[in-house]
Image: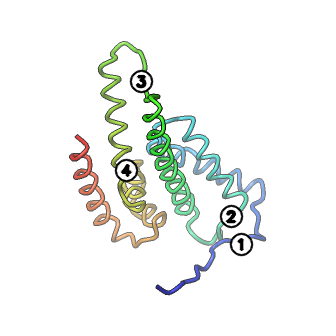
Amino acid sequence: MENVKRVSRFHPQARLDERTFEAIFYEHYDRIYAVLFRLTGDPDEADDLAAEVFWRLLVRPPALDGNLGGWLYRVATRLGYNHLRASRRRSQHEALAGLENQPAAGDDPAGEAERLDERRRVRVVLRQMPLRDVQILILRHSGLPYREIAAAVGVASASVGTLLARAEKRFEELYAKES
């Protein structure tokens, strides 16, 4: 296989001024957080990962002539996906040590246990899927339009519908096996 050198879209010497960074942050934070919350299911972890996304923007901003929203969503979904993979390894170690998560006490312990199990199954399935499929599913179910999804995953807008349908089908098949 031939080594292909990737052309960087980053300009290390270019820095965002405080006003520009602040405007970008306020414009995109809520949606970035929502995407990460869907992936992690943990508000604190989603907030930490969102902070990491914006830290990366501050440290190594992309070319501002490109689609900044797409870049932010791509970074967010990759960080979230990496978090899912790391949490799977952590869960395996905890299971071996007998430290599995217990459902929280509440008014409806059976319902809470079902919700926790459902979330666990969804995350297990997402961990088995290719990154692009996970990105497309999470971004679409976070309410992003096809053009923003296309920019985030680097495909043509016209391809998003087909890719989304395939990802949903793959998810359903894997989810059925988890039952």
* Secondary structure category for the residue under label 1: loop
Question: Of discs 2 and 4, which sits in the foreground?
Answer: 4
Sooner in the amino-acid sequence: mark 2 or mark 3:
2
The amino acid at mark 2 is: Pro
> Residue at point 39% right, 55% down?
134
> Residue at point 51% right, 52% down?
82
Q: Relative to the observer, which residue lies in front, 162 or 20?
A: 162
> Residue at point 52% right, 62% down?
70
- Do residues under tags 1 and 2 come within 8 Å of each other at their CB atoms? yes
Q: Residues within 10 Å of mark 2 (few under 14, many from 20)?
A: many
* Secondary structure category for the residue under label 4: helix
Task: Report x, y in % for residue 7.
Answer: 61, 80
Name the residue carrying label 1. 11
Q: How crowded is mark 1: few (under 14 residues within 10 Å), some or many (20 or more)?
A: few
Name the residue carrying label 2. 61
- Distance between mark 4 and mark 3 Cα atoms: 22 Å
Sooner in the amino-acid sequence: mark 2 or mark 4:
2
Task: Report x, y in % for residue 91.
Answer: 45, 39
Q: Quadrant of residue 58?
A: bottom right
Sooner in the amino-acid sequence: mark 1 or mark 2:
1
